[in-house]
Amino acid sequence: MRQAAFTLHANVLAALRGEANDRSVGGLVLLATLAIAGYGAAMGSFGALYGGSMWQIAFAAIKSPLLIGVTFGLTLPSFVVLHLLLGLRQDLRDVIHSLLSAQVAVAVTLLSVSPLTLLWYLSVPRYESAILFNAAMFALASVAAQRPLRARYRPLIRRNPLHGRLLRVWLGVYAFVGIQMGWVLRPFIGKPFAPAEFLRPEKWDNAYVIVAGLVWRTLFGSGF
Amino acid sequence: MIYALRRLEQLLRGEATALPNLTNDRFDLPVGGLSIVLIGLGMIYGACMGLFSLTGSGSGQGMQIVASTVKTPVLFLATIAVTFPSLYVFNAMFGSHLKLMPMLKLMIGALAVTLAVLSSIGPIVGFFGVSSTSYPFMVLLNVVVFAIAGVLGLGFLLQTLHRMDLANRPEPGRPTEPPPLQGEAQDSPTVGSPLSFPDGRATNGSVWGVFKVWIIVFGLVGAQMAWVLRPFIGSPHKPFTWFRPAGGNFYESVTAQIGKLLGTW
């Protein structure tokens, strides 16, 4: 038990520092899943704190790892094919390990700020500010994880500068899919006094079409 | 089948088109096995594309997904069949040394790259298909994905044409005996990517000429073929048919879809 805790701590530190080590992929995935689920539980507690249902906590804890995991899984095939095509087959293992440890870094950062989220919920009882605070925490974790990701990528880029460009492509595609995934998997936070729901009952829609429509209406008035 | 899949991987990794393997007009590619793999890859993407029709905001007709799955491989194979004769003639006109079989293999190879990229983006398109309600968005997303796959496939084509030109140009000191292509044994980092210029040598003028003709013919025929074989996604307001009546064209439609996407806001 003690030994396992030590290994876990060492693995987390390695992911945060961007150090390469030969952990198993399964261990990385498990670690990221648990940490994100932990943050999800904190995120979903808003409704419960203000008279909502406790179920939202469980739903958010299940959905948050799905958000990251499914997005990652959807972007992986095209990324692998691009590496084959651009002659980077021999680096593929390192690349996937780097991306996975970046996910661990995001997850652990989120988990580490979850007490802050709870404190925020207790001090500001407004749904909109809860949404904004969570968005800020996700942004913070994503920006923070860039550091270990860059560190892991440095030797790869030194071997072939193409890796740098591919990483930017991947981040772009990941964000493109991730934003829509977050939209589809709403609600994460849960409105107070609203019944708990796993997914919103209304029809799914496209986040980009809605946001572009909002921007368009703001700039040019209604309609096209 | 497994063999064909492994050859596809070699193709994507650039081993099949590495310089030493292209001498004497030799272009080692199992056309039959690879064609089956290509059909499978096309079907994967077709199914992902057709997913939109199953949702409430699509046409809601399940046959669309079957039709897309069948029609996507047909789209590519028909494009090859239609363009092959004219491309072969143009090729000869531009003074290329390419013979019939190597050229067919070259086109199958480029198709394999295109379809591999396409089907690897398939899950993303499928996800947006399931979660979106906007038909114009789906049309434009598919156009963009096809464009990405097409550009990479054409990049492969250009590089392989260039390499075949290099490999068959008489030059002193070049080993004439091609080393045998081995399975996994050729895992050396010296094998360049299938998209990079070998030895940094610039592309020959006639290769560029041939390539420009190919781009134009492929682009025009491919887009029109897709138009003739439509619907692939299934408009939410029209009943399911295997084919739509003739009329209109691809470019006009894409412009109209952009307009509609703006109009819905």
Image (cartoon, coloured by chain):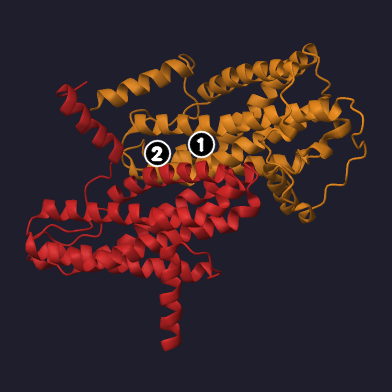
Q: Residue at x 66, y 15 (%)?
A: B213
Residue that appears at 63% across and 48% down: A88
Residue corresponding to mark 2: B53
Rendered location of residue B186, percent (x, y): 78, 52
Quadrant in which residue B157 is drawn: top right
x and y percentages locating residue B242 in the rendered image: 50, 30
Alpha carbon separation for disc pair 2 and 1: 10 Å
Where is A73 relative to B132, above or below?
Answer: below
Is A13 on the left-hand or right-hand side of A48? right
Residue under pointer 1: B68
Q: In the rendering, which numbered label is found on residue A31?
A: none
Element on which disc 2 rests: helix
Give the amino acid at mark 1: Ser
Q: Residues within 10 Å of mark 2 (few under 14, many from 20)?
A: many
Look at the image and tell me whether residue B126 can be seen.
Answer: no
The residue at the point 47 percent across, 56 percent down is A151
In the rendered structure, the colour chosen for chain A is red
A165 left or right of B55 in image: right
Q: How far from the left and from the top, in percent, is residue B99?
A: 84, 24
Label total for image: 2
Image location (x, y in percent) of residue B80? 67, 26
Assign the N terminus of chain A to one quadrant of the image: bottom left
- At label 2, the amino acid type is Ser
Chain identifier, colour orange: B
In the picture, which quadrant includes the C terminus of chain A? top left
Q: Are marks 2 and 1 on the same chain?
A: yes
State the SS at label 1.
Answer: helix
Residue at the extreme top:
B93
The reply to whether discs 2 and 1 touch (Cβ–Cβ < 8 Å) is: yes
